Amino acid sequence: MAPEGPTAPTEAPEQPLRREREDETPAPSPIAGRLRGKREEPAKESRAFPLREGPNHQLQYWPFSASDLYNWKQHNPPFSKDPVALTNLIESILVTHKPTWEDCQQLLQTLLTVEEKQQVFLEARKRVPGDDGRPTQLPNIIDAAFPLTRPNWDFATPEGREHLRLYRQLLLAGLRGAARRPTNLAQVRNVTQGKEETPAAFLERLREAYRMYTPYDPEDPGQAPGVILSFIYQSSPDIRAKLQRLEGLHSLSLSDLLREAEKVFNKRKTPEERKERLWQRQEERDKKRHREITKVLATLKASATPVSIKQYPMSREAQEGIKPHIRKLLDQGVLVPCRSPWNTPLLPNLVRNKEHQEMELPEQHRVQLRILLSSKPSLPHYTILYIQA
C-alpha cells in the first residue's frame, strides 16, 4: 500500500525548493503570499496554482490564497442568481489549477451555500460511472469515485491523479445538474418593459429571467424564437405595435428587433414635450367646441305660441358631465339665468375619442323649427343655439 501523500498541507514545506538555474526566480512561499494579500489590493485575476510543475518535473502544491478566494466570490454572481456563470468560473479553475480534494471543498465552501453544495454533491454522485460506463447505484463505487470525506489520494502518483481527474469531472457534472431549474414561464412573462426603460436594458432583464426561471440558456441560438416572442409581446405598447408591423418578422434576428426598438424609443418625446403637445391639442379642441356663437334672426309664424318642453330624464353621469360646460358658458356670459316661456331640453351626449371621453351639451330645437318661417332651403343642424331677436 502506497504511503499517504502530502495532501493540502497548511504550512510551508520543511525544505525550500531548489532552483535548477541561478537566474530562475524562486517560487513564492504560501506564507509570503498570504502576507502580501493583506498588504496589497486583491488582484482581479488569480495567480494561485495548487498543483504546478516544479524542479525535476515534480508537482508542487500551493494552496489557494485568501485574495484569490475573495476575488472569485466578489467578482462573480452567486450560484442562485446565475448558475451558468459560476459553473463556468469553477470549470476554468478546475482545468487550470488542478485543485486537490481539499481545495475543491474550500472552493465550494466559499462560492456556494450549504444547500447548494449539498445539491451539487447529490447530482454528482448520481453520475458516478460503473464498469459499463453508465451511472451506477453501488454505494462502494460511488464512495470511491466521489467521497464525502477526505480520501487517501496522493497527487504525486498516477493513480492519485486519476482519482482527482474523475472527481473534478463529476464535480462539474454535479454543478451543471444542480443548475437546471424547473421551468416557470409565468415568471418570465411577468417581466415587462418599464416606461422609461431602454430596450437593451429590458432585453438583459428578460435574459436574466430565462436563466433564473427556466433551464434554457437565452444565448443559445436554439432558444432564440422563444426569446424573440417574449421581447416583442412584453415590450412597451408603442414598441410592440411597431415590431408587430415589421415586414418579414419571422426572418428577423433578435439584434434586428433590438435596433428597431431602439429607433422607436429614441423618437419618444420627453414628459415636458408630451405635456406641451397635450395642452396644444386641448386648446385646439376647446376652440373648435366653443367657437363664437352667432345670432340667428328668425320670423315666427302667425299662429306660433311659446314652446315649452319638459326636460328629459338624465342619468347621474350626464348630470355630472354637463356641469363643466354650463359653468363655462355662464362664465363667458353666453348663458344668463332668466324666466322665459321658451324652453329647450338639454341632450347630454357622451363623446369618446382616443385621448379622453366627456359630455357634449347640444339642445333640441326640432320643435322650434316647426314654428319658424324658413327663408332658406334649410337651417343649420339642431345643435345650434338660437337666440330670439
Image: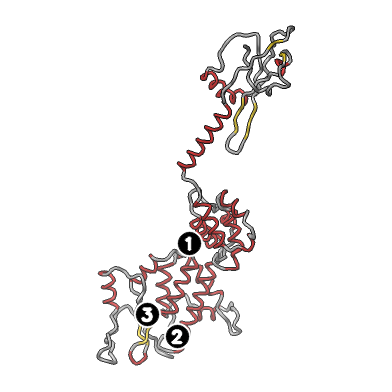
Q: Quadrant of the N terminus?
A: bottom left
* Disc 3: CA contacts within 10 A as few (<14), some (14-19) or many (>=20): some
Disc nearest the viewer among 3 and 2:
3
For residue 35, which quarter of the picture? bottom left
- Whole-angstrom CA distance, mark 3 to mark 2, is 13 Å
Q: Quadrant of the C terminus?
A: top right
Mark 1 or 2 closer to N-term? 1
Marking on residue 161: 2
Reading the image, the residue beneath label 1 is: 81
How many numbered circles are shown?
Answer: 3
Q: Which residue appears at 59% of the width and 58% of the height?
A: 184
Q: Which type of secondary structure does the marked residue at label 1 adopt? A: loop
Q: Which type of secondary structure does the marked residue at label 2 adopt? A: helix
Q: Which residue appears at 57% of the width and 79% of the height?
A: 138
Q: Nearer the viewer, residue 341 or 300?
A: 300
Reading the image, the residue beneath label 3 is: 50
- Whole-angstrom CA distance, mark 3 to mark 1, is 28 Å
* Pointers 3 and 2 in contact (C-beta within 8 Å): no
* Disc 1: CA contacts within 10 A as few (<14), some (14-19) or many (>=20): some
Q: Which residue appears at 61% of the width and 84% of the height?
A: 132
Relative to 151, residue 281 above or below: above
